[in-house]
Image (cartoon, rainbow, N blue to C red):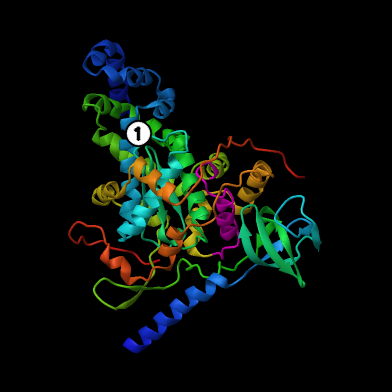
Amino acid sequence: MIARSILRAALAAALVSLPGMAQAQFPNIGGLVKGVQNVKKLGDSLRKIPEPEEIKIGGDLASIILGAAPLVQDAEKQRYVNRVGRWLAMHSDRPDLPWQFGIVETDDVNAFSMPGGYVLISRGMFDQMRNEAELAGVLAHEIAHVAKKDHLGALQGSLRNAALGDFTEYVGGNGGIGGAFKAALISAGKDMFTRGLNHDDEYDADRMGVVIAARSGYSPYGLVGVLQTLSAAPEEKGYALMNKTHPLPVDRIERLDRAMGTKFDTVIAVVEDLPSFVALRAAPAPAAAKSTPARAPARSRPRRRN
Amino acid sequence: MRRCAAILLAAVLLCRVTSAEAAEKGQILRAGDLLAQPFIDAAKAGPVTANQPVTILERRGAWASVESNGTKGWVRLLNLRLEAGAARPGASRPGMASLRTGSSGRTATTGIKGMDEEDIRNATPDYQELELLGTLAVTADDARATAQKAALKENTVAYLDKGRSRK
């Protein structure tokens, strides 16, 4: 451990002493090299990483959730959620990210997002929706987390210890994320998904989400409807992780009430529901089989029963 | 066996149909008046007290139409709490066995598929699924065209500050 610390210090020293050389080779790493000069500030630099790196980090984190629950095999439904999601994201502060949305196959009620524009919601959550405005509310809440870079902030604590030594790989590997950094990132991602973001980030994402929904033409009260559903949900395992990682739904409703007041009463060009949602909600199960997206050959996926 | 499955399927489908019309139960949070219309300055339709049980008939934006003790009227959605412990009617409840028809035929299967903390801890990143996710994404133009077809209107709305407590 001590030896490793010394090695890290040596690597850091080497980098610090050679910033000019490193920069000559990789012109965009000035900020990263600068970050190495101060370990404590390293985490903060995560929020400032270039967009391609942010998207790469997001992909690695999304693959964790996809490893726990695969995509629902219904291309029509997936395409639909992408259209709604992308439209919402176009009304956020980061409209041009390569947004990707997906419904993952699990009965549990939850939704996740990752840096760079990844949003995954569970089928259990999708099935709870009363209308498209509720779906929009959940997606917009997740989009807000991405727009605010909440994940990068949350990851910084976990990565602080691991990242220094691996910055050499990060810098040296043609801008790619080195293996050790990636292992640390996966571990930090699992921490983030199981511990959640901080509660203030959740309240802020609620407030931003209802605005994104309203800007996109959806009732901003869709998210309120979902939170009401969650507040009345029975204490079952299917809600456990989401409850652990979020403030109480009643507290979120109360904060939204405070923030929204009657401000949206004049925003009347909004819809509650659309035929597209109604059609998918009522679609008989067998129809799904026809539009199954191409999937890689059968992989044995050991699935633990809860 | 096949007949059982058919009956079960019929029952599930029937549930779906009726649940759409099934009313939700809730309670009033703050005492006040029900209104005759879903507008802040609409005529009063009758008083309600805190914790008064109501049946929710319809949701419309910031408002919900409710009925209580024979009186119907509109109340702010944010002045309602849903009856605790009751799953939303019609929604499939997580953790419950669900009926699915597999692609191979009319085989009814029940399965409980959760994703809890341990599942995430033990997950191996799946890059094949990530690739598949990428193929399902749509362009901004596609999303805009779909929104226009659905006649979704864009609104100019400022971000919200935290606001003040009612208390």
* Residue A191 visible, this orientation: no
Question: Callout 1 environment at 10 Å: few (<14), some (14 to 19), or many (20+)?
Answer: some
| Residue A227 painted magenta | yes
Q: The C terminus of chain A appears in which quarter of the rendering?
A: bottom left
Q: Position of residue A250 (x, y in %)?
A: 63, 53
* Residue at point 44%, 77% (across, down): B13
| Location of residue A215 with respect to A288 vertically, above or below | above
In the picture, measured across the screen, residue A20 lies left or right of residue A100, that is: left
In the picture, measured across the screen, residue A16 lies left or right of residue A191, that is: left
| Residue B77 painted magenta | no
The quadrant holding residue B34 is: bottom right
* Residue at point 56%, 36% (across, down): B156
| Label 1 secondary element | helix
In the picture, measured across the screen, residue B149 lies left or right of residue B103, that is: right
| Location of residue B99 with respect to A87 vertically, above or below | below
List the residue tagged with mark 1. Answer: A54
Report the chain holding disc 1.
Answer: A
Q: Which residues are magenta?
A: A214-235
Q: Position of residue B163 (x, y in %)?
A: 68, 38
| Location of residue A278 with respect to A179 vertically, above or below | below
Q: Nearer the viewer, residue A262 or A108?
A: A262
Q: Amino acid at mark 1?
A: Glu
Q: Position of residue A147 (x, y in %)?
A: 45, 36
Q: The N terminus of chain A appears in which quarter of the rendering?
A: top left
